[in-house]
Image (cartoon, rainbow, N blue to C red):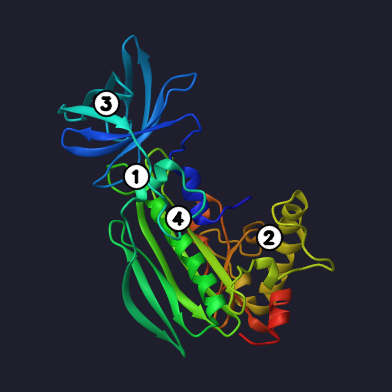
Amino acid sequence: MRRLAVFAVLAALAIPGTASAQLYQGKAGTAPIVLELDQGDGAPGGRYFYRSSRLDIALEGERAADGITLRARSTGDSLVLKRADTGWAGTLTTAKGRTLPVSLAIAAPPAAPAGAPADLGDYDRMQLAGLRFEAGPVERIGTRTIRWHIERLTGTRLFRIETGYAPAALGKINAALTRTHWAHVRNWFGCPGYDGGAGIDLDAAGPAYLGDTFVSYAWRTSWGCAGTAHPDFGIEGLIYDARTGTEVKLDDLLRFGKTPPPPERSDAWYAYRSGAFAEGLVALLKRTHAKEMAAEDAEGCSYDDPNVWSYPAAYLTADGLFVAAYFARVARACDAPEWAVIPWRALNGPATRRASGSR
């Protein structure tokens, strides 16, 4: 199974924009809104958000002789729009029957927030406009210091490192943390719930592992986005080289076989992960966690099945490398057992060999 990182899954679930879409801003009644409209060659569609909540509302519609009609399945809103110069005018009718005047003009999106991912589109930049991260409490971890930062509208929190590493590496890691933080804020807005509120129930990062050689943390998320078949949850692990600031992959820490793993996401890499890697990881876990791997579970947690270990999320702890098993939906309660930590001494990738035993 080609499992994506949690934030990539949520990005894929978010309502997509298209290259032919046009961006507008204006008001529905007195409420400021932003609309992305794709008239394309087929039926018109798009998405919009109220600036007060910024949550995506997907639209699908049809053409009329003098305009377009767009409907939002998740909220029951209906937009009837006609051309007005270079924009649109019309009405928005809510699910409760309230009708509001709508006026929209072409929007000029602002610059992306400082430190945001490079792939932000025009709609994303409108959605994130004016938001910022507020500095919060300081936390001391050993001899090092982190400070938590929060985006208030979503409540999304992530730390930045303040002391304990060389300035160049620290700056590179903090830049990566900022990009990830913005990505999670964007995904929050892209996952509206079935009740009109946010569809993300949990989006929590930490705790942070700050070692001499590596920086690592986990990000746990659970969601139930409108339009999806069922709620879901997942875990994402991130690891950085504390000396260079570069991201460290699982294959840099743990590998099986006589040759280096193939290039990531190549056909050969998927074959390696589902074959030699998964089988090797099961064998290693049987040596380091024999009791847990051998235990019979009434819930169907077959931890000796290589298929559940092919693409684990992973992050570092004081005890070693945590690897998260991933099960099919019927057994998702078996995911990521807390005991699945590979001891430091068993890590054999090039990144751990370069570390020469330093953590």
First in residue order: circle 3 vs circle 4? 3
Tell me which corner region of the image, top left, top right, bottom left or bottom right, holds residue 211: bottom right
The residue depicted at 78 percent of the width and 52 percent of the height is 268
Q: Is label 2 in a helix, a strand or a loop? A: helix
First in residue order: circle 3 vs circle 2: 3
Circle 3 or circle 4, nearest the eye: 4
Question: What amino acid is labelled 2 in the image?
Answer: Pro
| Position of 348 relative to 125 (above/below) | below
Marks 3 and 2 in Cβ contact (< 8 Å)? no
Q: Position of residue 75 (x, y in %)?
A: 28, 35
Mark 1 vs 3, N-terminal side: 3
Q: Quick one: label 2 or label 1, which is nearer the N terminus?
A: 1
Q: Label 1 near label 2: C-beta < 8 Å?
A: no
User: 74 and 233: which one is in front?
Assistant: 74
Quarter of the view holding residue 226: top left
Residue 335 position within the rendered picture, expressed as x and y whole percent measured from the top left: 52, 61
C-alpha distance separating marks 3 and 2: 49 Å
Q: Which residue is mark 1?
A: 192
Does any portion of residue 179 appear in the rendered image? yes
Query: Viewer-nearest of labels 3 and 2?
Result: 3
At label 4, the amino acid type is Ala
SS for dot 1 = loop
